[in-house]
Structure formats: structure tokens, C-alpha cells
């Protein structure tokens, strides 16, 4: 497994597979890897001849009062997991190389990036769209794998890839959860043990909404009220949003159907957690 820091070197490494018709599969991450990332890497290994993982904590997708400086890091452990999943290349660019002084071009995705996390994290998805475009231009992948855990991010990247005719197949992957249902996230490391217990209300809320849906309930007003009630029992939890949206363009709805996404964001202490489910699909 090669560890590459230089953008120039990474771009040069991508040339040979392209010329020889070997497929590059790409998994972009911010590191502090867990089983969720591993599932993307394993699928990337299956789909590509060359598997590239990037680790880059992208400063331009963090707001002023967010956790950029405290974002958890453990490169040694990441290398072990990447190696075990069969990565060929780990690309770890520096912030100074990705955003040299004078950098002034960004990619902006409009309507789909405005609600949900876009509303509470202004500018976040422009930061994501910009770094993903840069990484695609550096790694030159045939396919790139993203988790449905970050549902809106996946929708934004699909839209951007289509709008800009980027020659990359976007693959969405299922959410990997702990045994008790908590969606795996690098940010779970911030949680105290009592916060970790409170965080289970996300899974309880998704499960409750899915039960009601299975029993025939379709009204967003009723489902939203029932879902919110789960959080309101947890003193430590502050709701950011509980939203039922169409699964492609994230439009607002009055009634849910197969393909509707229930997207949740809450704050527990200082930690912001997101989770989601798509009705008619596996949890
Ligand atoms: P991050 O390092 O948090 O930026 O995540 C990198 C990629 O891993 C993104 O495409 C995430 O959606 C995906 N990912 C993170 N957590 C999970 C999870 N629990 N299950 C599946 N994919 C995940």
C-alpha cells in the first residue's frame, strides 16, 4: 500500500491505470476510520482494479464554531484498516497544497444543498462539492463510493456529478450500525457514556417512524409528531431537524411513500449527530 501526500504524485499515479483500462475505485474520507468506511473500501476493492482511499479533514466544509480543530485523528490505525481492506493507495494531501494562498474557485450546488444540514451549516455543501471535485480531478476515479449515512451529501454529489458531467460513477452504500443501532460515525468518539446512551434515540426514532409507516401511516404531520416525541423524552437531546423529504431532490412532502427519506439531526452535548432512513428500503 502506497501512502501519497503530493497532489502531483497522485495525479501521475492515476495516469497508468487510465491508459491501461484499469478501473480506479475511490473512497474519500476524513479519516478516523471505522466499519462504515471499511464497508465502502471493501466494495471499492470489488469494483476497482486500483483502490484509492483519501484522508483529508477539509477545512472549508467546517463552520467557524464547528469541530475542525478537535476532529479525531489516528493515521496509524487508519493505515492498518485501509491495508486490511485492500487499499492500494492512501492519499493524504496537506491543507496548504489543497488550498494554497490565492485559492478562489469553489463549486456551489443550489436548492438541494439548502435545507437540512445546509440550513444549520451554511456553506458546508459548497465546501464538500469543492473538495470532492478537486479530489476527482486528482484521483481520476471511474467510480467513487459514499455512505448513505450522509444522505444529503450523497444527493448533492450525485447532482453535482450529473450537472457538471463528471465522468465518475457515484455508488451509494448502506449505513453501517453498531449492534445497538447507533450509526457508526467518527464523531461518536466525542460522546460520554451517558451521551452514547442518549444517542440511541436516533435509532429509536427511525424505528418508530418505520413501524408507523408499515402500519399504513403516511401523513408527514403525524409521523413528524410521533418521531419528535421520541426525542422530547430525552433531556440531553436537542433536535436540529426532523424532516421527511423526497429521496432524490429533497423536496418537502405532505405524505410519505416508498423512497421518501426521514432525515434526522440532533445535538447531544457538544456533539452533532445525523441519521436517516429511506421508507421501503432496509434500515
Ligand atoms: P467521513 O470520514 O465521515 O467524511 O465519511 C467518509 C465516507 O464514509 C462518507 O461517504 C460517509 O457517508 C461514509 N460513512 C460514514 N459513516 C458511515 C456509516 N456508518 N455507514 C456507511 N458509510 C459511512
Image (spheres, rainbow, N blue to C red):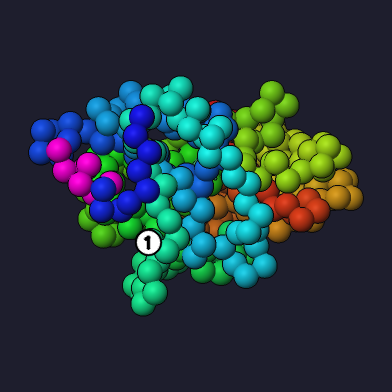
**From the image, which quarter does the N terminus lie in?**
top left
- For the residue pair 272 and 97, the one nearer the viewer reads as 97
Left or right, 17 with reference to 175: left
Asked whether the viewer can see residue 247, the reply is no
| x and y, in percent, of residue 218 in the image | 63, 43
- For the residue pair 86 and 196, the one nearer the viewer reads as 86
Residue 16's place in the image compared with 99, above or below, is above
Residue 258's place in the image compared with 162, above or below, is above
Q: How many marks?
A: 1
Q: Is residue 130 inside the magenta stretch?
A: no
- At 40% from the left and 58% from the top, the residue drawn is 131
Dot 1 falls on a residue whose secondary structure is: helix
Left or right, 5 with reference to 178: left
- For the residue pair 74 and 124, the one nearer the viewer reads as 74
Quick one: label 1, few (<14), some, or many (20+) residues within 10 Å?
Answer: few
Question: What's the magenta region?
Answer: 10-16
Question: Residue under circle 1?
Answer: 97
Give the image quarter of residue 122.
bottom right
| x and y, in percent, of residue 207 in the image | 70, 33
- At 45% from the left and 30% from the top, the residue drawn is 82
- Taken as a whole, is the magenta stretch helix, strand or loop? helix
**From the image, which quarter does the C terminus lie in?**
top right
- At 25% from the left and 27% from the top, the residue drawn is 49
| x and y, in percent, of residue 215 in the image | 68, 31
- At 56% from the left and 63% from the top, the residue drawn is 62
- For the residue pair 9 and 230, the one nearer the viewer reads as 9
Give the image quarter of residue 163.
bottom left
Left or right, 47 with reference to 178: left
Give the image quarter of residue 193.
top right
Asked whether the viewer can see residue 194, the reply is yes
Q: Residue furthest left?
A: 19
Q: Does the beta carbon of the residue at mark 1 sit less than 8 Å from ligand 1?
A: no
Amino acid at each position: 500500500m502506497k501512502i501519497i501526500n503530493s497532489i502531483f504524485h497522485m495525479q501521475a499515479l492515476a495516469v497508468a491505470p487510465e491508459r491501461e483500462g484499469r478501473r480506479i475505485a475511490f473512497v474519500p474520507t476524513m479519516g478516523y476510520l471505522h466499519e462504515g468506511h471499511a464497508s465502502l473500501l471493501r466494495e471499492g476493492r470489488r469494483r476497482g482494479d486500483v483502490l484509492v482511499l483519501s484522508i483529508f479533514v477539509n477545512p472549508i466544509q467546517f463552520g467557524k464554531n464547528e469541530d475542525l480543530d478537535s476532529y479525531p485523528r489516528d493515521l496509524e490505525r487508519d493505515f492498518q484498516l485501509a491495508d486490511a481492506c485492500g487499499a492500494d493507495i492512501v492519499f493524504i494531501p496537506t491543507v496548504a497544497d489543497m488550498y494554497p494562498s490565492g485559492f478562489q474557485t469553489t463549486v456551489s450546488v443550489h436548492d438541494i444543498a439548502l435545507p437540512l444540514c445546509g440550513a444549520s451549516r451554511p456553506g458546508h455543501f459548497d465546501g464538500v462539492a469543492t473538495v470532492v471535485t478537486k479530489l476527482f480531478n486528482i484521483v481520476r476515479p471511474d467510480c467513487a463510493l459514499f455512505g448513505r449515512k450522509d444522505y444529503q451529501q450523497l444527493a448533492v454529489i450525485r447532482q453535482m456529478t450529473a450537472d457538471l458531467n463528471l465522468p465518475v460513477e457515484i455508488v451509494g452504500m448502506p449505513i453501517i450500525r453498531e449492534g445497538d443501532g447507533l450509526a457508526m460515525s467518527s464523531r461518536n468518539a466525542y460522546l460520554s457514556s451517558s451521551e452514547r446512551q442518549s444517542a440511541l434515540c436516533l435509532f429509536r426514532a427511525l424505528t418508530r417512524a418505520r413501524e408507523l409507516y408499515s402500519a399504513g401511516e403516511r401523513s408527514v404531520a403525524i409521523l413528524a409528531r410521533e418521531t419528535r416525541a421520541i426525542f422530547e423524552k430525552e433531556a440531553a437531546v436537542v433536535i436540529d431537524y426532523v424532516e421527511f423529504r423526497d429521496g432524490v431532490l429533497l423536496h418537502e412532502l405532505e405524505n410519505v411513500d416508498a423512497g421518501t427519506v426521514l432525515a434526522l439531526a440532533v445535538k447531544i452535548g457538544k456533539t452533532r449527530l445525523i441519521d436517516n432512513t429511506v421508507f421501503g428500503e432496509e434500515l
